[in-house]
Amino acid sequence: MARSPFNRKNASSAHGQPSWFDLAREVSQAAAGKGYGGHEEVYAAFAAERGLHIQSVRRALTALTGFSKVAALDPGRAGRLRDLPVTVVNTIARWTEYDRRAAFEAMDRYEAGAIGTRQIDIEEREARKRNADFFSHLTRYEGLYELDAFDTAFAHLLKDWRSEPAGPFDSMG
C-alpha cells in the first residue's frame, strides 16, 4: 500500500518535539570539546530532558553527519533531506556513499509517496549487497597480485638462514 504524499509541514516535529535536525545540532554543540565519556553524558542528559531513548539522540547525530555529506554533494537535496524522518536520512546518507543516483531517486520516490520507510531500507540493503558482490570480484584478483608482490618483496626473509655460511668467525669455533 502506497503512503500518502510527503507532508513537509508535519515532518519537522512530532508530538511537540523539535526536529531531528534541531536536536542533533543542539546536542553536537553541547558535546563539542568533550571526550567520549562527556559525549555520552550529554546524550543521556538530552534524552532524559526530552523523554527520548539515548539511541534516538545517537541516530539524530548520525543523520546530521549524513546530512553534511549529502549537503557537500547536493545542497538542494540536503535542504529537502532535513525534513525527512531520521531513519530515511540515515539510509539515504549511507546509500549515497556507493550509489548516489539510486539514493537520490529513492529519496524522490519517498517524497512522492511511492515508497515507504521500510521499502527504502530494503532497497538500500539490496543495493549494498550488489555493490559488495561486485567489489568482491574485483578485489579477489587484486588480492592475488598483492600476495605475489608481498612474496617477491619479502622472499629473503623466508629463507632458511641456518643453511647459509655465517661468516669468518664460523671457522674459529
Image: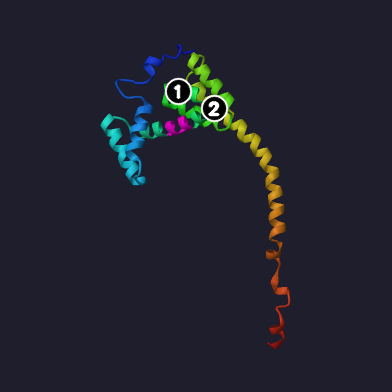
Instruction: Count neighbours of disc 2 (C-alpha within 10 A) and say few if under 14, some if 14 to 19, many if 20 or more.
Output: many
Q: Is residue 66 magenta?
A: yes
Q: Position of residue 140 (x, y in %)?
A: 68, 43
- Amino acid type at circle 2 is Glu
- CB atoms at circles 2 and 1 under 8 Å apart? no
The residue that label 1 is drawn on is: 79
In magenta, the rendered stretch is 62-68
Percent of width and height locating residue 136:
65, 39
Would residue 131 appear left or right of 79 to someone viewing this image? right
**Which residue in the protein does label 2 denote?**
124
Q: Residue at x 72, y 86 (%)?
A: 171
Give the quarter of the image for residue 162.
bottom right
Judged left or right of residue 39, residue 134 is right
- Circle 1 residues within 10 Å: few <14, some 14–19, many ≥20: few
Q: Is residue 48 left or right of residue 9?
A: left
Instruction: State the separation of the CA atoms marked 2 and 1.
Output: 21 Å
Q: Position of residue 154 (x, y in %)?
A: 68, 60
Q: Residue furthest bottom?
A: 172
Amino acid carrying label 1: it is Gly
Task: Report the label total.
Answer: 2
How are the residues colored? rainbow
Q: Secondary structure at mark 2?
A: helix
